[in-house]
Image: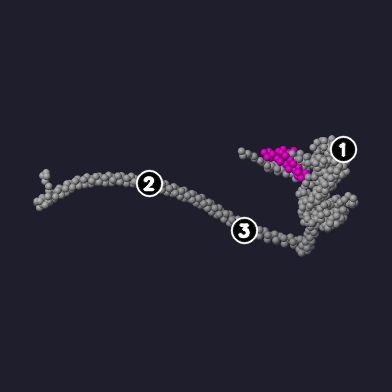
Amino acid sequence: MSGYIFNPYIGGKMDVLLLIPMVIVLVALFFYLGWLFNSKVGKKSIASAEERAKQIVSEAQKEASNIKREKLLEVKDEWYKKKIEFDSEVNQKRQKISNLEKQLNVREENIEKKFDLVIKKEKENKQSEKELHDLKRNVDIRLAEVDKLEAEQNTKLEKISGLSAEEAKNMLMENMVNTAKSEVSHVIKEIHDQAKLDAKKEAQKVIVQAIQRTAADHSIETTVSVVQITNDEMKGRIIGKEGRNIRAFEAATGVDVIVDDTPEAVILSSFDQFRREVARVSLERLITDGRIHPARIEEVVEKVRQELEEEMIHEGENTILQLGLHNMHQELIKHIGRMKYRSSYGQNLLQHSVEVAYLTGIMASELGLDPVLAKRAGLLHDIGKTVDKSVEGPHALLGYELTKKYKEHPIVVNAVGSHHEDIEMEHPIAPLVQAADAISGARPGARREPLEGYVKRLENLEALAKSFEGVAKTYAIQAGREVRVVVEHDKIDDLVADKLSHDIAAKIENEMEYPGQIKVTVIREVRKISFAR
């Protein structure tokens, strides 16, 4: 066949016939081979798929079995919890039911007891009713017997006395009326005497309350003032060359200047408190300034005098405001300010007048009188003592003329003029002013009592209170009208403190002499202290 070239056009018909069977045979061969191959591969795939499917099914069954087991355990746990809760609730309800049953049993027992008691009481009441009925019947019988006896006795008495029942009744009533009149007269006398005693006690109570509410410390006014200096060399400058400074100072102020061996002090002496105050302030300013010579002395003294006069006006206005008064003439206010530098028997006049005003106002309030007018009269009662000393006459009448001149209320004018009975008292406020004046003047430390004696009295009062066991500290206050006792809390309890106050008061009553009354206050306190660090 080498070199042979196929030519379809040569012998073509024969070649086509040979080619067709060959193609058919080849196609059949290829088909068979394909079928054979596909048949073997398909069987293997099916077997593999079946094996895989079995494996998946087995795993799924295992997983389903595990899930089923877990869910079953969860359901069992939940069921167990619910069972426990149910059992607990059942037990609680059973317990409640048991308690209720016990309470019902107790109530039933109590009801039975009460029922038995009621039955018993009913029986007792029935018995008592029967006894009362029997007693009433006996009483009725006895009353009938008494009435019968009374009638028989009245008949016998009428025969014996020769008087009828009506005549005897009239005679008896007459005797009873006479006896009643005698008893009534006696009772009226007792009531009258008691009323006098009560009135006296009430008056004393009003006065004591007024004293207690206005109690204040007093001491005797002295006639000297002490000026402190920095060193003794200043004494030479105050005296000046050949004494010209001290002479100029005494001439300008009207006071005596005492320069002695007292260390770092100069004494000013004068009966006139205003002059002494002018001298004290002036000397202190001169010492502070350092320029001390006659011209400077006169200048400073005059300036201080003017300042103090203005201060007196302010003092008067402050006093009016303090007492709650108003609409007072300016000249009277000036006179009130002058009281600050006046004294009466050693007692400061302004302080005394303010105290009298308070006392009078309190007593007037207690008695239902006008307290404002009362305080006004009390404040102005000694206003006559501030009038120029060249004007002669009793200070009460001078005050009367002064208050009348400046249009004070007639009740106030009369109280001022009559508080020493120079004129007749026309209103109840006038004797109140007189009483308040006497109370203020008689107060401890106010008048006619040396300062040392006053201090000694307070010291004795404190010492007496401190003499009791368990007392830590004592303080006499309010011019000796009250003593406060501080006790040791670990030694004195509340009950003993109450008894202690009574014991101290009793000892003061027995061992001391004093006007009015002294209040004893026992103080017991417990203090606990800690520190935050």
Determine which residue is flagged by label 1.
241
Local crowd size for mark 1, using a 10 Å CA cut-off: few (<14), some (14–19), many (≥20): few
Looking at this view, is 480 or 202 the one in front? 480
- Under circle 1, the secondary element is helix
Q: Earlier in the sequence, mark 2 or mark 1?
A: 2
Q: Give the magenta part as a residue range.
A: 467-492
Considering the image in quadrants, where does the C terminus appear? top right
Determine which residue is flagged by label 3.
133
Q: Is residue 112 magenta?
A: no
Q: Position of residue 518 (x, y in %)?
A: 77, 45
Q: Earlier in the sequence, mark 1 or mark 3?
A: 3
Q: Earlier in the sequence, mark 3 or mark 2?
A: 2
Q: Amino acid at mark 2?
A: Glu
Q: Amino acid at mark 1?
A: Lys
Distance from Cα at disc 3 to Cα at disc 2: 86 Å
Dividing the picture into quadrants, the one containing residue 288 is top right
- Per the rendering, the mark at residue 74 is 2
